[in-house]
Amino acid sequence: MIIVINGSPKPNGNTQRMLEKIARDTGFEYEVFNLAELKISPCTGCVKCAQNNRCIQPDDMLPMYDKIVAADALILGGAVYFGHANAATLTFLERLFPLRHVEPQTIGKLAATVCVGGNEAEQSVKQLSYQLESYFNYNVIASVFFNSATPPCFTCGFGTTCRYGGPARWMTPEEFENFNKITPEMFQNFEDHPDVVAACENLSRQLRQAIADLPGRA
């Protein structure tokens, strides 16, 4: 079983579709958790989880712990906000804290990471991988990122006039003066980028092989 954590709040967005493609292409069973649909509070730092490797907060994270520990692999995906993974994704990572005490429960377990953002997805996915490896002792097999070049300015209603948004920042003054319409083709889908699709498929192959090589799978 593969546990898939979708940190993006956009239903069926690039992040979710990439995560599901990766998991589906491994050929193994998987379960998707969409963090936007769950109530998961931030870590309070009480450290009471050191007693039994479980958090005392009664929210939607509690039933996930046993599934995460029992899973063959974890695939974690986040949307990029302000140069790093969004708050829901980082809160999920915070709440993995109980699994690292005294008798760590994720040492050597398999993982993969995915990030989608306007133009900072690569550094964000590296950070997710680092946190899983460094703090929770996961074996991160690989990661995939997609820079969609699609800022929220394209959907807020002021993208062509706001002088503080993405278009105004990356365009020359002359280009921005002539930027007066947002068209459907400006919204990028990872499926239209062969290199990203290939990276997802390669990650699936690597993860499938790593799971197949687990003790007891032979």
Image (spheres, rainbow, N blue to C red):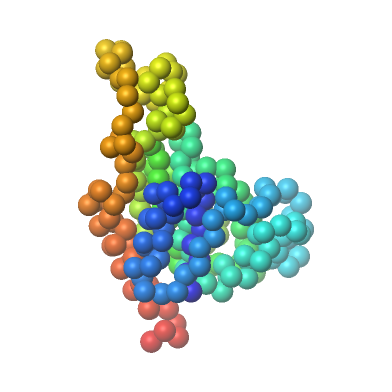
Q: Is 187 rendered above or below residue 94? A: above
In front of the other: 166 or 71: 166
To which quarter of the image does residue 151 belong? top left
Residue 49 horizontal/vertical position (percent): 73, 60
Q: Residue at x 66, y 52 (%)?
A: 40
Q: Which residue extends farthest left?
A: 194
Q: Is residue 139 left or right of residue 119?
A: right
Q: Is 85 rendered above or below residue 156? A: below
Q: Residue at x 45, y 74 (%)?
A: 29
- Residue 15 visible in the picture: yes
Which quarter of the image is occupied by the C terminus?
bottom left
Q: Is 154 rendered above or below residue 69? A: above
Residue 18 horizontal/vertical position (percent): 38, 55
Q: Is residue 110 left or right of residue 169?
A: right
Residue 85 horizontal/vertical position (percent): 49, 43
Residue 200 horizontal/vertical position (percent): 32, 58
In front of the other: 207 or 20: 20
Q: Is 99 rendered above or below residue 197? A: below
Q: Residue at x 34, y 73 (%)?
A: 209
- Residue 108 visible in the picture: no
In front of the other: 70 or 193: 193
In front of the other: 93 or 9: 9
Counting the numbered discs, the total is 0
Q: Residue at x 23, y 51 (%)?
A: 195
